[in-house]
Image (cartoon, helix red, strand yellow):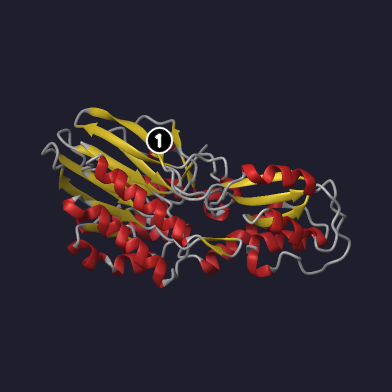
Amino acid sequence: MRFLHTSDWHVGKTLKGHSRLDEQEQVLREIVGIARENEVDAVLVAGDLYDTAAPTAAAQQLVVRTLMGMARDGIPVIAIAGNHDHAATIDAYRPLAGAAGITLVGSPRTADRGGVVEFTARSTGEPVTVAVLPFLSQRYAVRAAELIARTPAEHTGAYDQQLRDILASLTAGFRDDAVNLVMAHLTVLNGKMGGGERTAQSIFEYAVPASIFPVESHYVALGHLHRRQRMEAPCPVHYCGAPLAVDFGEQENEPVVCIVEASPGTPASITDVPISAGRRLRTVRGTVAELSVLAPSLGDDFLRVFVKEPARAGLREEVTALLPGALEVRIDPEFAAPVTVSRPSEAGGAERSPSELFGEYLGTRGVEDQRVEQLFRRLHDRVTGSG
């Protein structure tokens, strides 16, 4: 039987104030086409359907259309909430989605109440069991462990132990005559960051070892880290990565979806299918003259530009006229004057993330301590995120 594994769509994500909804639509349309072309038995969407807990109506319409397009012709679609999604809202759509053949899981659930999804593969007639675990923040991990694993909180003090208990409960019903899958949105130790993840929800206590997944799993479909990668584990554990780079930190990533083939008693085999839709991101450096020579080769890529000249009035406008795809223009550090006083950023706060602005503020105060920046990210995510 065959499955499609995708995650981290981040629909609604903007880049330096520029909407990418059209690109996201093209990418998701391509993924739907891949699912149909490969005649998959199910689609697994491992979290972060949206970029924010309060997506726009247009973003929600795009996600709903995509899920329904995947579920056409009776293909089961299973999607879970990631740390960017609003779990309660995802759960609120469950009844309507279920009528269309789409299983949505926003919050962790017991096996008998949606934490395990079972169906029969239409291509082989064999049973499939999918244990699903949406993103689980630390402050809800104890509650979820008590609900799902019936484990007293005092015995599950560590985050990874709580997830072990939850997964052990959800996978207890794995069968020898079925294909057993796990889908989760979390960070595995030694996983490589893609570049656009929420750092505060990807490090520290949130990282768990790959050994938490049972060896009986034919395949573990993960979301959260945006880089395509296979994790070392007793069973196949894979991040499919984001199908569209969300910022310039991900410009080197190769966007794919995973086609997974499995049968009872045999570990899965995985084929990466490249995603061609969407504009690529690129960082370029040079003087204005050098950038002028480079311009014809850049196509419609979105650009981050480091100008190797001292700052001067009108330089940004000169560069953007030369490179229409330039979303970010900076002076190369070699030519940048040292910051001696606190002043508003020329880039404008509306186009920069809170973490970038806070990092700039620390620089004006001579503070160089990553722990302070990491704490800020954690506090900001707690206030603005769904966890």
- Counting from the top left corner in percent of width and height, residue 93 is at 28, 67
- Counting labels gives 1
**Residue 337 placement (x, y as % from top left):** 87, 55
Determine which quarter of the picture holds residue 103: bottom left
Seen in the image, is 131 located left or right of residue 291? left
Would residue 198 be visible to someone looking at this image? yes
The residue at the far left in this view is 125
Q: Secondary structure at mark 1?
A: helix
70 shown above or below 261: below
Relative side of 337 to 270, left or right: right
Q: Tell me which amino acid carries mark 1.
A: Ser
- Taking the spot 76% from the left edge, 66% from the top edge, the residue there is 346
Q: Nearer the viewer, residue 9 or 201?
A: 9
Residue 373's image quarter? bottom right
Query: In the shown orientation, is residue 27 left or right of residue 91?
Result: right
Residue at 20 percent across and 54 percent down: it is 72
Q: State the residue at coordinates (54%, 43%).
A: 193
- State whether residue 148 is above or below residue 380: above
The residue positioned 53% from the left and 65% from the top of the image is: 382
Q: Which residue is mark 1?
A: 211
State the residue in front, 365 or 23.
23
Quarter of the N terminus within the rendering: top left
Q: Residues within 10 Å of mark 1 (few under 14, many from 20)?
A: some
Q: Position of residue 270 (x, y in %)?
A: 34, 32
Q: Taking 101 as reference, is 281 above or below it? A: above
Please indicate, yes or no, whether residue 166 appears anywhere in the rendered image. Answer: no
Q: Position of residue 330 (x, y in %)?
A: 75, 54
**Residue in front for this viewpoint, 206 or 273:** 273
